Amino acid sequence: MNRKKGDKGFESPRPYKLTHQVVCINNINFQRKSVVGYVELTIFPTVANLNRIKLNSKQCRIYRVRVNDLEAAFIYNDPTLEVCHHESKQRNLNYFSNAYAAAVSAVDPDAGNGELCIKVPSELWKHVDELKVLKVHINFSLDQPKGGLHFVVPNMEGSMAERGAHVFSCGYQNSTRFWFPCVDSYSELCTWKLEYTVDAAMVAVSNGDLVETVYTHDMRKKTFHYMLTIPTAASNISLAIGPFEILVDPYMHEVTHFCLPQLLPLLKHTTSYLHEVFEFYEEILTCRYPYSCFKTVFIDEAYVEVAAYASMSIFSTNLLHSAMIIDETPLTRRCLAQALAQQFFGCFISRMSWSDEWVLKGISGYIYGLWMKKTFGVNEYRHWIKQELDQIVAYELKTGGVLLHPIFGGGKEKDNPASHLHFSIKHPHTLSWEYYTMFQCKAHLVMRLIENRISMEFMLQVFNKLLSLASTASSQKFQSHMWSQMLVSTSGFLKSISNVSGKDIQPLIKQWVDQSGVVKFYGSFAFNRKRNVLELEIKQDYTSPGTQKYVGPLKVTVQELDGSFNHTLQIEENSLKHDIPCHSKSRRNKKKKIPLMNGEEVDMDLSAMDADSPLLWIRIDPDMSVLRKVEFEQSDFMWQYQLRYERDVVAQEEAILALEKFPTPASRLALTDILEQEQCFYRVRMLACFCLAKIANSMVSTWTGPPAMKSLFTRMFCCKTCPNIVKTNNFMNFQSYFLQKTMPVAMALLRDVHNLCPKEVLMFILDLIKYNDNRKNKFSDNYYRAELIDALANSVTPAVSVNNEVRTLDNLNPDVRLILEEITRFLNMEKLLPSYRHTITVSCLKAIRVLQKNGHVPSDPALFKSYAEYGHFVDVRIAALEAVVDYTKVDRSYEELQWLLTMVQNDPVPYIRHKILDMLTKNPPFTKNMESPLCNEALVDQLWKLMNSGTSHDWRLRCGAVDLYFTLFGLSRPSCLPLPELGLVLNLKEKKAVLNPTIIPESVANNQEPVNSTNNHGQSVGFQNTFSNSQEEEEIDMDTVHDSQAFIYHHLNMLERPSTPGKEQSSGEMNMHPVLAAPLSVFTKESNSSKHSDHHHHHHHEHKKKKKKHKHKHKHKHKHDNKEKEKDPFAFSNSPASARSIRSPSLSD
Amino acid sequence: GSKHATTPADNYYLARRRTLQVVVSSLLTEAGFESAEKAAVETLTEMLQSYISEIGRSAKSYCEHTARTQPTLSDIVVTLVEMGFNVETLPAYAKRSQRMVITAPPVTNQPVTPKALTAGQNKPHPSHIPGHFPEFPDPHTYIKTPTYREPVSDYQVLREKAASQRRDVERALTRFMAKTGETQSLFKDDVSTFPLIAARPFTVPYLTALLPSELEMQQMEETDSSEQDDQTDTENLPLHMSTDDSGPEKENASVLQQNSSLSGSRNGEENVIDNPYLRPVKKPKIRRKK
């Protein structure tokens, strides 16, 4: 495996270079959900003895392959279809994850592999030896694809166009192989010709320029011809076909927007902002948008909200909104900006290998951040950075770390950089979705750290350099070797940085990119009055999982009476204490303004401070230039000063969170003041609401006056003359709108001495609902009303239960009766006047679940199950499913768990399937250390099947199943399974048989996993470094070994040794093997290291091979019809070329 | 009809009718008739009456057409001409020798129609309104009637009322819907106290979820009709390529035209949007290789 190090440029893992590909889809049948077409790849061999061409293809049925018009034999082998063969009783996740990583490796285009292996016809060998061009023509079809292409066909009357039926490509990372054969790698660039013949009422949107649209002869269909002259990776090819409404952007005519019928007014409004994003990126990158056109398509049942492909982006239709909607507007704009950032970095500039992904995600995320800063302001930007930082820190501490730039050294499994995880990080397809999300988050945060180090100006220069290099390369039409300039690598990126800035950022990269983990600081201080010195102590926790030790500079800001001072401390190995000299003497009653960091001078009431100390507050790493968590101790009055006077929103938010621990009248006052202060950032004020509620609850016995926030709300939003009635809605001022929405939700969290929500608060919220009047408002109040329902739900406290009586109407709490009355009315009104995105239904469903959970209403999943059905709006379904998941957990219902799992397998919407697994993982019915009646063998089998073979069409879903399996059963053998039957296992390393460790009780208790054979098996066939291996022993499941060995052997025979058709194997079998145990790339150069074990194997089991081979044969289904069979020439003649092959067999004993 | 007509109005009409009968009789005598049946005379009288009425009605129209209230001679002339009467023969006919002179009907006052409702005196015309204009209507039709109950203008009560009214309507409506359709319930033992209209899946769920309801649209128009940049909403609508059997080619071309003209007017210059998705679809080539 060549890991491209240094600045040598790109070395292709393939023995050929792809220069051009034609994709032609002649027929799309919406009724049958099928696709028929062909591809033609133009490739140039780079080695003389190229005799096999490996391509990626999943799920496609391949009819015929021709190379330069000569029929070619091929094998279709997808080991990821079923990861572990045989009804192995192992069932442990370690085993699975290793096998899965091996399977993905075996078809990984970045390792030169693929599912489809085409034999170059012998007639062409001479041609190949002269390195002349080959044209590989493949006819294929797709029937009811389960992944890669998604069909949406509403079940109603009318033609497909009238029904709004559409289809689009989707998937996670490289998923193009799901819908046409290609080299599905981000590093193999070529130019494209794309043709789609569709119903005349439909539009086909794809990458590149639409050259022309031509009717077919019967005039009932038309063909869209696209040309993409900028070299592009297959993984960035996409397609959307449907009866779209077309909108040419009024500001940029080369930009076209598409949406489903009837939504055009929304599309107009939603995209009216896009040109500003274009302008922003082009300006900061000083580079024009690289493609000659751009298309946005908004489709239903989206896989992800935003998917960026070359010159087009596919969005969820649910991002569309009208001018009346406030809350969705910034979210949608963010999505648009994200998609556009990825056009530059991700689509136009691609990556060399998976380990360089962080650069692309980092840069696109970083420039998206710059756009955020410009559009929503510095406050919003800093708030966002803080949020992202908190997220990544929490995730890394939970899981043990996110590694941006994994390097997989030469085959030593001990080097596995992610042994703390239950999945392999070597491939994007084995990653947990949550990990990948966090990976992206970390990537852009690290880019920001680099910016801090080298300045934004240099940063943008680097980007510009990458882009201009790429655009020069892209215009080299006939020099495909230049195209690798369009690929970014970690080393290339770092070299650019050092060239441009002249700075050495290696330590930074080493800390955050080459290793995982975040920093955990604990800070405290003492003021030494004698020396007028601040004695700061900063400790680190670097032993917990997910942490690392930080050594280097750390900024500390100290606000003193005489001003704010920055100090840069040097964090070193052994020094915990840092003395910081203070600039001001403590003083008392001196009326003088206090200068702040931003130069502002303010009056402060200093009476709360410690008379001896000049310190107002202290902040550690205020600029967030370390990926860290800081727990800092300072007294309550310091937090209060920080909240009131520090101008940085992050500092204010930190102060608010800290004040939760200080429920005093002074904290209350500080929070109330912030709430009232209109200049204060609205998110800070919203946060203050919740903190105030918590403080009020802690102070409940001493609290004076009306419930917290009530008088404030009255003053701000109610009528002057009648304070119990809220003003008619006017949401022109968004800050107060957000505050108006949030305050009732926070107030509902208030509790009295009996731990009940005060009656006064409940009545207040009910009055808000009653008097809500939106008639004069320019904006919709659906989010506001939804939050009022959330507030009602928040006010619910557990029912006082008498002897577990059955919940009936008669014993319903009168307050709950009022709440139910409102929820019923709201939910019913939604049927008549539905709100935008059904926000109100969503809130009602959540509230009903809260009432059930608290014992006011009988717990029953029936209502939620009906709302979870296909055909409801996706937000509603998710809310309903969340309730069912919660019910499953609380009531330990096997029936509902089965219902959910059935939906995971059968639901038409991939996002829903993914989301159910995600919610089950986050709110699991039981966990590995828990006794539960749900945990039984059948469930283990079911989940195992789900991840082993049931989810092979969707990388994300399979990883989701793995996550759930891990949460429920852990890495080792699920405890509910009976002990394996096989008592004796063979340890190949130590060459001896040992007792299966699972039988030994102690080892089970010690959580020692019985590791299955795949490790050795994998090695023996030439996979490397794919396995985490913390175990000393490796046991072999003999059956697996036999079968796989035999199988590989069988294939070797077929490929390398000439055989006569029909002699040893039947011809059909050779063409199509739907399920193969092992990859074809059997003998790679790297296999040397593992030969030892190979021989070992053979020595032991040679005699069994033949038997196994025959047995295996029967397993294969004959997919080909006889006609095809006869046409296919697959006589692999015994040619010198094959003998010369570097892949010549060394094993054929 | 009843014979005992005694009202002044009846007398008035009867007198005139009798005169007309005399006229008809004398004309008949003039024409050489010696006797006539009563029914024939009655019919001719009826015809004459309609003829004269028509002249009057028509003349009045002509007069009003020229914004006058009093018909002039020319109005009558035009009327007669219009009715096909040769006006020039009239003076000669009037002066014929054998004409008979008939006494004018007895002078009786035009009967006064009794007023159903008279309340107060009609207001006289102010000085600037000419006397020939119609009189003011009865005062009660335009003079406000004072009431003695104070109208509700208290903000609090109004809000209260609006809120409870809306709530009542909503509750009644949803209860009705729940009664007439399928429902779900939170309590197994009671389905009527909190009836929930059953959730029904949509065939195209995103439409109801995303499109503003008509009510909201209306509301939006009311609240900011001024701020909306009109025309934009309809501009691109016809772009949706519908392919009815009627020559899609032509349709596309017209779409293109429309679009370019619209954008041209916006930019104030004639630049046609050249977007590949707006270009007409090409006809297939006749020549086929295979």
Image (tube, coloured by chain):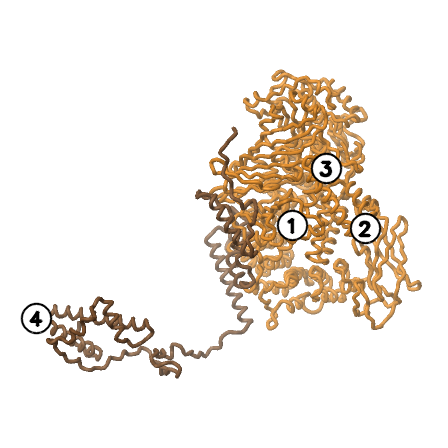
Chain colours: A orange, B brown
Between marks 4 and 2 in the image, the one whose residue lies nearer the viewer: 4
**Mark 4, chain letter?**
B
Label 2 neighbour load within 10 Å: few <14, some 14-19, many 20+: some
Looking at the image, is A525 positioned above or below residue A860?
A: below
Label 4 neighbour load within 10 Å: few <14, some 14-19, many 20+: few
Residue on which disc 3 sits: A484
Where residue B123 appears, x then y in whole percent?
37, 82
Three-letter residue code for mark 3: Ser
**Mark 2, chain letter?**
A
Q: Which mark is residue B32?
A: 4
Q: Do labels 4 and 2 share a chain?
A: no
Q: Residue A453 carries which label?
A: 2
Q: Mark 4 to mark 3: distance in Å?
A: 125 Å
Q: Do labels 1 and 4 share a chain?
A: no
Q: Mark 2 to mark 3: distance in Å?
A: 29 Å
Residue depicted at 77% across the width and 29% down the height: A1034
Q: Is mark 3 on a helix, strand or loop?
A: helix
Q: Mark 4 to mark 2: distance in Å?
A: 131 Å
Three-letter residue code for mark 4: Gly
Where residue B235 appears, x then y in whole percent?
52, 54
Quadrant of the image containing the N terminus of chain A: top right
> First in sequence: mark 2 or mark 3?
2
Q: Are marks 4 and 3 on the same chain?
A: no
Looking at the image, is B277 positioned above or below residue B52?
A: above
